[in-house]
């Protein structure tokens, strides 16, 4: 399985620090839509393949649980920062992660029990194959659904 090479002492930490904002964009362009990586000592399968996401998040939803643990010992300094971080993270999650409860197969890749699956949401949204003009602001893209229910929410209907 393709994936970034490890440095003897630093693992991939030096790669993350060098390009900390767009590292997933860079790696998906370099290694393809699905590749393997280690998050610390935990193996992860990183994918922007929409068919795999459909399988994990919809078709076989009951086989994939929780959020995969992506970091250990993360602490927040203040309660206010924690509340803001949690709220923003739920609305604009940069990563969607899941863990299989039993082995599953996808295009010759065995998704073992306990393997972390990481779907980079931002990378998918900025991929021109799925969204032709990712940098063009389109208010209808965001406002369509809430505006449909505006009358009901305001008690007008």
Image (tube, helix red, strand yellow):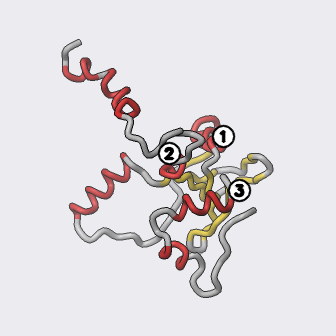
Q: Position of residue 8 (x, y in %)?
A: 65, 86
Q: Check disc 2 and report its element: helix, strand or loop.
A: helix
Q: Which residue is mark 3?
A: 112
Residue 14 in the image: above or below residue 44: below
Q: Position of residue 12 (x, y in %)?
A: 58, 76
Separation of marks 2 and 3 at Cα, in angstroms: 27 Å
Q: Which residue is mark 2?
A: 125
Q: Which residue is mark 1?
A: 51
The C terminus - image quarter: top left
Question: Which is closer to the viewer, label 3 or label 1?
Answer: 1
Work out whether mark 3 precedes mark 1 in sequence or the reverse, and give the earlier one: 1
Nearest the eye: 43 or 131: 131
Question: Which is closer to the viewer, label 2 or label 3?
Answer: 2
Question: Which is closer to the viewer, label 1 or label 2?
Answer: 2
Work out whether mark 1 precedes mark 2 in sequence or the reverse, and give the earlier one: 1
Work out whether mark 2 precedes mark 3 in sequence or the reverse, and give the earlier one: 3
Q: Check disc 1 and report its element: helix, strand or loop.
A: helix
| Mark 2 surroundings: few (<14), some (14-19) or many (≥20) residues within 10 A | some
For image coordinates 44% across by 46% down, the residue present is: 135
């Amino acid at each position: 399985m393709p994936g970034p090479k490890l440095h003897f002492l630093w693992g991939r930490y030096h790669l993350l620090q060098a390009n900390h904002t767009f590292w997933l964009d860079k790696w998906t362009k370099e290694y393809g839509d699905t590749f393997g990586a280690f998050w610390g000592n935990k193996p992860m399968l990183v994918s922007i393949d929409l068919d795999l996401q459909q399988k994990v998040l919809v078709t076989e939803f009951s086989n994939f649980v929780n959020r995969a643990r992506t970091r250990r010992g993360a602490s927040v300094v203040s309660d206010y920062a924690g509340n803001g971080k949690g709220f923003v993270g739920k609305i604009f999650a940069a990563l969607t992660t899941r863990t299989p409860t039993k082995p599953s197969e996808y295009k010759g890749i065995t998704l073992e029990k306990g393997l972390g699956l990481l779907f980079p949401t931002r990378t998918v949204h900025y991929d021109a194959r799925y969204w032709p003009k990712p940098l063009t602001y389109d208010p209808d893209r965001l406002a369509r659904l809430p505006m449909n229910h505006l009358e009901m929410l305001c008690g007008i209907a």
